[in-house]
């Protein structure tokens, strides 16, 4: 169950970014592309995390907690940054998905169910990014909220991992 929750939490940073893009014409295609990268990076991260955990079995939970904690801090510290990089949207989707790699390294180190996590990250990212791109035209939501929620949830997960 935690794999599904974290997969969806990782999609919140994409929502925070895409909510700032009101003029995207290919919303569906961009959402599919972003979901693809949110599935590929975790797959690579799980492979690396599993490999690292063999060599660092004693420290794996501490390292994964530290990685998640750092990702959470980055999300919280960047929540005030409303600047959207002026890049091509496919490159922006890749950049928005890179953090899913580092989070999945920590989950790979904990030997969690990778395919469930990858599937939830992909489906959650697709659905939430597509909704964010549609809602972005209305500018009702503030992307700071999504970054703060994702950061706080990842902080909580990192502390729980550290305490177990």
Image (tube, rainbow, N blue to C red):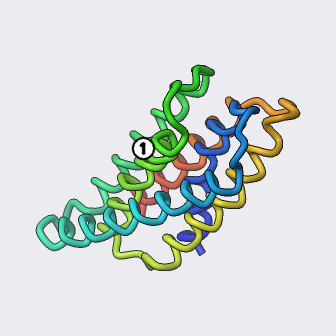
Q: In which quarter of the image is residue 69?
A: top left
Residue at the spot 11% in from the left edge and 68% down from the top edge: 55
In which quarter of the view is residue 51 placed? bottom left
Q: Is residue 50 left or right of residue 108?
A: left
**Percent x, y for residue 74?**
46, 33
Quarter of the figure with the C terminus: bottom left
Q: Residue at coordinates 68% horizontally, 29% vertically from top-left? A: 144
Q: Where is residue 156 in the image (x, y as percent from the top left)?
A: 55, 49
Could you tell me which quadrant the N terminus lies in? bottom right
Furthest residue toward left: 55
Q: In this view, does 141 lie to the left or right of 71?
A: right
* Residue ID for mark 1: 69
**Taking 99 as reference, is 54 above or below it?**
below
Pick the residue in front: 58 or 23.
23
Vertical placement of residue 39 versus 143, above or below: below
Tell me what residue is drawn at x 66 percent, y 39 percent.
Answer: 18
- Secondary structure type for disc 1: helix
């Amino acid at each position: 169950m935690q794999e599904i929750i974290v997969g969806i939490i990782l999609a919140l940073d994409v929502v925070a970014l895409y909510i700032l893009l009101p003029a995207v014409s290919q919303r569906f295609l961009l959402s599919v592309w972003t979901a693809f990268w949110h599935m590929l990076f975790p797959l690579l991260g799980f492979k690396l995390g599993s490999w690292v955990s063999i060599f660092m079995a004693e420290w794996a939970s501490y390292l994964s907690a530290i990685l998640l904690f750092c990702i959470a801090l980055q999300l919280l510290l960047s929540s005030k940054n409303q600047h959207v990089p002026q890049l091509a949207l496919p490159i922006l989707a890749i950049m928005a998905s890179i953090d899913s790699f580092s989070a999945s390294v920590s989950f790979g180190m904990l030997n969690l169910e990778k395919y469930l996590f990858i599937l939830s990250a992909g489906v959650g990212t697709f659905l939430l990014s597509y909704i964010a791109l549609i809602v972005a035209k209305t500018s009702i939501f503030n992307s700071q909220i999504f970054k703060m929620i994702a950061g706080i949830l990842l902080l909580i997960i990192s502390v729980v991992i550290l305490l177990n």
